[in-house]
Every structure is written in structure tokens, then in C-alpha cells.
Image: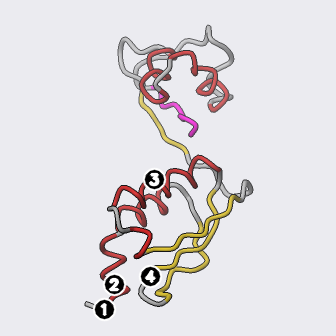
Amino acid sequence: MDILEGLKLKYESVLSLIKEKGVVLSHLHLEGDKLHMEGNAPNENVKNDVWNAIKAVGDNWSSEISCNLGVDTSLPQPEKHYTVVGGDSLWKIAAHFYGNGSQYPKIIAGNPGKLVDEHSVIHPGDVLVIPD
């Protein structure tokens, strides 16, 4: 296996996250002995997620990979979907996804066709968009 394929395999979790979060890579190649990635993320949070994923691979990431990501807010923003189950509330869903139930207005804002305000009723089986 050549160096490029070996590094792509080692950083497969990062490359999967890039694809999942809608990062657009303009360059992915070997530069010296380093895997070089360059492109744009749809927002700063996604950019930070990519960097955290790189660092999670191992301590010697700085000698194996270079990553130059910008932010391009015109890219589609990543979305998660959640299917409501019995006993759910917007507060409970926000607590699960954001770690804080008071963030439920984000869910309302991400579902303008389904939710109007905190008094909107949700039912088991409803599919909600969970904004990043």
C-alpha cells in the first residue's frame, strides 16, 4: 500500500465526517509525506468538528496531515433528522441533541412548516430536522 492510501485509511473517520457534514474538498493529495486536505466547510462548527476528528486519530497528526479549511456559508448546511417517539417534548429533544433543553427554539426554527412556537404539538412518528 502506498503512503497516500495508508494515510487515507488511517484518517478514514475524518474523511467520512467530511462527507457527512457537507465539506467540499478542492484538494486531497500527498504533499511530501503528509496528507494534504483543502476546501470549505458550511460553517465554523463543522470546521471545528473536522479538526477535532483529526486530533482524535492520534498524537502525531501534525506530522501526517495538513488541513486548510475555510468557511463557505453558501454550502448546504448539515441536518440531522429525528423521529419523535412517545413521551418526547421539544425540551427533551433539545436536551438530547444540544445538551441543554432550553435550546429548543433551534428545533422550532429548523422546522418552519411543522412548528410555530413552543406550544406546537408534536406526535410520535413526526420527523423533525435538528439543525447543527
Q: Which residue is mark 4?
A: 34
Q: CA distance from mark 3 to mark 1?
A: 26 Å
Q: Earlier in the sequence, mark 3 or mark 4?
A: 4
Identify the mark at residue 52; answer none if there is no mark.
3
Identify the mark at residue 2; answer none if there is no mark.
1
**SS at badge 3:** helix
Residue type marked 3: Asn
Tell me if residue 12 comes above or below residue 44 in the rendering.
Answer: below
Residue 129 place in picture, x, y as percent: 54, 35
Q: Residue at point 54% right, 70% down?
A: 67
Q: CA distance from mark 1 to mark 2?
A: 6 Å
Q: Are marks 1 and 2 in contact (CB under 8 Å)?
A: yes
Q: Residue at point 44% right, 16% down?
A: 92
Residue type marked 2: Glu
Q: Dividing the picture into quarters, in which one does residue 24 lie?
A: bottom right
Q: Which residue is mark 2?
A: 5
Q: Residue at point 58% right, 37% down?
A: 131
Q: Which residues are magenta?
A: 126-132
